[in-house]
């Protein structure tokens, strides 16, 4: 009954419009006081959240992605990829998805990925005759690769909450990221093959390919530095964020010369606002998590789950349904910070690897990014494409099915997640 009352109070606050950070932190503080625990746990929880080396990667990756966005890196990247695959069936759509995947490997943000590639790809694809709804849906879904292909801000937060290795989480995201990218590419080619509305792009000449590739080469180098450095053990994910930020500044300021002081100021301010919002939510979740732990809520819920779901696959189905429903009214990071502390104690008794579950959870919360009414990617593409929410939501529906199919595939074949971090 206590767990049900606490959850009911939390969702009542959220439905009343209380910001997630204050709903979590405020309710956690009330629970501590009512339970007779020291209220000093609140400032201690806030300090332990902010004074954390792992979470330092969040503002660094956000600033890096905003600098790349303001520096117009997406334009050169898209032009290079289009020059190589644009003549394929549905080639422009394929180039869009591949560009999303490459930008995801240097940004860690789904919103930045959708906005950066969408700004360039949407007018180009529509001009080539692609159905408007298809274009909008493809960009909204393609943006979700930003939190699956490493680096990933939600994976950093998941590692912080569960005390799992962020580097292993990043490596575990590579296989599913490539899988989801391949599913989107195949869907794009089949759509182009059977719709017949688009006009194929001519094959680019050798000179055009060389020029666009040289122009985009620094971007590929940046992606290689981040992923290769983490995979090779040269630096930690937090250090990778700092290195990536430095390279992004050099790339946009000295190499491409597209960064101005005004754009840099915009990037810093936007990153600051987003960072404060994320850290406030994490801090509120920390206080709430400490309170419910003292009330033994996670342990009680784990006992209930163990009693009713003695098979891992039943547990995963139940969690998937809950996350899809929560995604209709909560954004991705809030879902993670509310659910993970409660679910984490149940994983090992059911034989579920915490690293694998982190990737599964990220795929499921990707659905929240593209489901109305609060899917952030829908709003981004709606703004970039000057479209209605209905148009974007209609176009993204089949790609939402592919996301769920990817979650099914990694459940059936867990080595898609675990092979790179543990066996390679």
Image: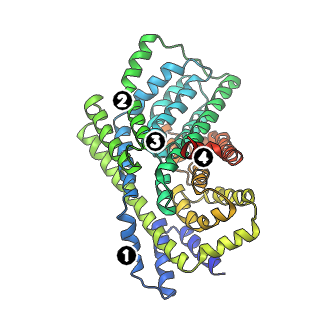
Which callout, 4 or 3, points at the residue further toward the start of the chain?
3
Comparing labels 2 and 4, the label whose residue is closer to the camera:
4
x%, y% of residue 225?
39, 37
Residue, disc 1:
43
Q: What is the residue that sits farthest to the bottom in this orientation?
A: 36
How far is the residue under mark 3 from the one under mark 2? Answer: 20 Å
Q: Does dot 1 land on a helix, a strand or a loop?
A: helix
x%, y% of residue 335?
56, 60
Q: In which quarter of the image is residue 51?
A: bottom left
How far is the residue under mark 1 from the one under mark 4? Answer: 37 Å
For residue 352, side relative to residue 217 (left or right):
right
How far is the residue under mark 4 from the one under mark 3? Answer: 14 Å
Residue, disc 2:
218
For label 3, the crowd category at 10 Å Cα-Cα, with few meaning under 14, some 14 to 19 and many 20 or more, is some
How far is the residue under mark 3 from the one under mark 1? Answer: 36 Å
For residue 69, side relative to residue 2 (left or right):
left
Q: Which mark is residue 231?
A: 3
x%, y% of residue 155?
50, 52
For label 1, the crowd category at 10 Å Cα-Cα, with few meaning under 14, some 14 to 19 and many 20 or more, is few
Q: What is the residue that sits farthest to the front in this orientation?
A: 423
Q: Tell whether label 3 touches label 4 (CB within 8 Å).
A: no
Q: Which quarter of the rendering shows the N terminus? A: bottom right
Here the colouring is: rainbow
Report if residue 19 is visible in the image: no
How far is the residue under mark 1 from the one under mark 2? Answer: 43 Å
The residue drawn where x is 41% and y is 77% is: 42
The residue drawn where x is 55% and y is 38% is: 142
Which of 307 and 110 lies nearest the eye of the viewer? 307
For label 2, the crowd category at 10 Å Cα-Cα, with few meaning under 14, some 14 to 19 and many 20 or more, is many
Q: Does dot 3 land on a helix, a strand or a loop?
A: helix
């Amino acid at each position: 009954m206590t767990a049900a009352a606490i959850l009911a109070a939390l969702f009542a606050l959220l439905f009343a419009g209380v910001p997630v950070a204050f709903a979590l932190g405020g309710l956690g503080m009330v629970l501590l006081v009512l339970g007779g625990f020291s209220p000093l746990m609140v400032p201690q929880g806030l300090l332990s959240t902010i004074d954390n080396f792992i979470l330092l990667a969040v503002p660094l990756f956000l600033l890096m992605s905003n600098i790349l966005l303001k520096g117009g890196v997406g334009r050169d990247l898209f032009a290079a990829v289009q020059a190589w695959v644009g003549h394929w069936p549905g080639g422009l759509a394929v180039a869009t998805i591949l560009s999303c995947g490459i930008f995801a490997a240097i940004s860690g943000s789904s919103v930045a990925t959708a906005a950066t590639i969408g700004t360039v790809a949407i007018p180009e694809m529509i001009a080539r005759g692609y159905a408007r709804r298809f274009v909008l849906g493809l960009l909204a879904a393609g943006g979700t690769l930003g939190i699956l292909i490493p680096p990933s801000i939600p994976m950093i937060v998941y590692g912080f909450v569960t005390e799992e290795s962020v580097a292993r989480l990043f490596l575990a995201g590579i296989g599913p990221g490539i899988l989801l990218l391949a599913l989107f590419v195949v869907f794009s080619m089949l759509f182009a093959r059977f719709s017949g509305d688009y006009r194929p792009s001519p094959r680019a000449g050798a000179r055009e390919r060389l020029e666009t590739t040289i122009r985009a080469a620094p971007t590929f180098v940046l992606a290689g530095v981040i992923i290769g450095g983490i995979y090779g053990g040269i630096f930690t994910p937090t250090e990778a964020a700092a290195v990536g930020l430095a390279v992004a500044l050099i790339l946009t300021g000295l190499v491409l010369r597209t960064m101005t002081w005004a754009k840099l100021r915009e990037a810093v301010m936007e990153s600051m606002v987003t960072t404060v919002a994320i850290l406030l939510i994490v801090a509120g979740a920390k206080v709430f998590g400490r309170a419910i732990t003292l009330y033994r809520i996670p342990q009680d819920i784990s006992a209930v789950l163990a009693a009713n779901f003695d098979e891992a696959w039943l547990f995963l189905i139940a969690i998937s349904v809950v996350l899809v429903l929560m995604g209709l009214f909560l954004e991705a990071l809030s879902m993670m910070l509310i659910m993970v502390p409660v679910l984490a104690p149940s994983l090992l008794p059911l034989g579920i690897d915490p690293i694998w579950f982190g990737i599964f959870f990220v795929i499921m919360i990707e659905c929240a990014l593209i489901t109305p009414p609060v899917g952030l990617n829908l709003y981004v593409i709606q703004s970039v494409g000057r479209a209605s929410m209905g148009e974007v939501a209609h176009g993204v529906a089949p790609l939402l099915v592919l996301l769920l199919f990817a979650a099914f595939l990694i459940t059936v074949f867990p080595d898609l997640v675990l092979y790179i971090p543990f066996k390679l």
